């Protein structure tokens, strides 16, 4: 499923909008506010939203750079973030 393209309505969402919708789905499921067939569909959509959020977060992480500083405190450049 990870290789399956996301539906365009999900792929076009910002991280924040996708996360907001995912949170809404989780709240509905936790409260039992949806019928079984709707819950299955909501779970499937939630899975896609989660995948989209993870992808967007990975993209953002890849773009983050760490500023390198010389002994005198002046910035000398940037290096890719090493989260480890």
Image (tube, rainbow, N blue to C red):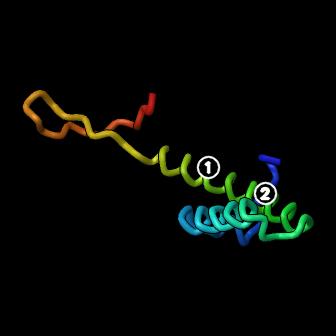
Query: Quick one: which residue is furthest to the left in this view?
Result: 72
Q: Which of marks 1 and 2 is nearer the N terminus?
A: 2
Q: Could you tell me residue 35's position as x and y percent?
A: 88, 69
Q: Residue 5 carries which label?
A: 2
Compared to 37, does 56 lie above or below? above
Total tally of numbered discs in the picture? 2
Badge 1: residue crowd in 10 Å (few <14, some 14–19, many ≥20): some
Q: Could you tell me residue 3's position as x and y percent?
A: 79, 47
Tell me how far mark 1 sits from mark 2, CA to CA: 14 Å
Residue 24 relative to residue 15: left or right: right
The residue under the point 40% across, 37% down is 80
- Which mark is nearer the camera, 1 or 2? 1
Residue 77 relative to residue 30: left or right: left
Q: Could you tell me residue 64's position as x and y percent?
A: 41, 46
Q: Are marks 1 and 2 in contact (CB under 8 Å)?
A: no
The residue under the point 57% across, 54% down is 56
Quarter of the image that includes the C terminus: top left
Compared to 56, does 24 lie above or below? below
Under circle 2, the secondary element is: loop
Compared to 82, does 57 lie above or below? below
The residue under the point 66% across, 56% down is 52
Q: Could you tell me residue 46's position as x and y percent?
A: 73, 59
Under circle 1, the secondary element is: helix
Badge 2: residue crowd in 10 Å (few <14, some 14–19, many ≥20): few
Residue 47 relative to residue 83: left or right: right
Q: Which mark is residue 46?
A: none
The residue under the point 61% across, 49% down is 54
Residue labelled with disc 1: 54
In front of the other: 23 or 29: 29
In front of the other: 32 or 25: 32
């Amino acid at each position: 499923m990870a290789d399956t393209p996301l539906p365009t309505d999900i792929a076009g969402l910002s991280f924040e909008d996708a996360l907001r919708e995912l949170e809404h789905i989780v709240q509905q499921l936790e409260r039992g506010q949806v019928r079984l067939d709707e819950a299955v569909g909501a779970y499937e959509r939630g899975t896609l939203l989660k995948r989209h959020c993870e992808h967007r977060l990975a993209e953002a992480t890849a773009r983050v750079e760490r500023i390198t500083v010389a002994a005198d405190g002046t910035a000398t450049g940037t290096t890719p973030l090493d989260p480890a």
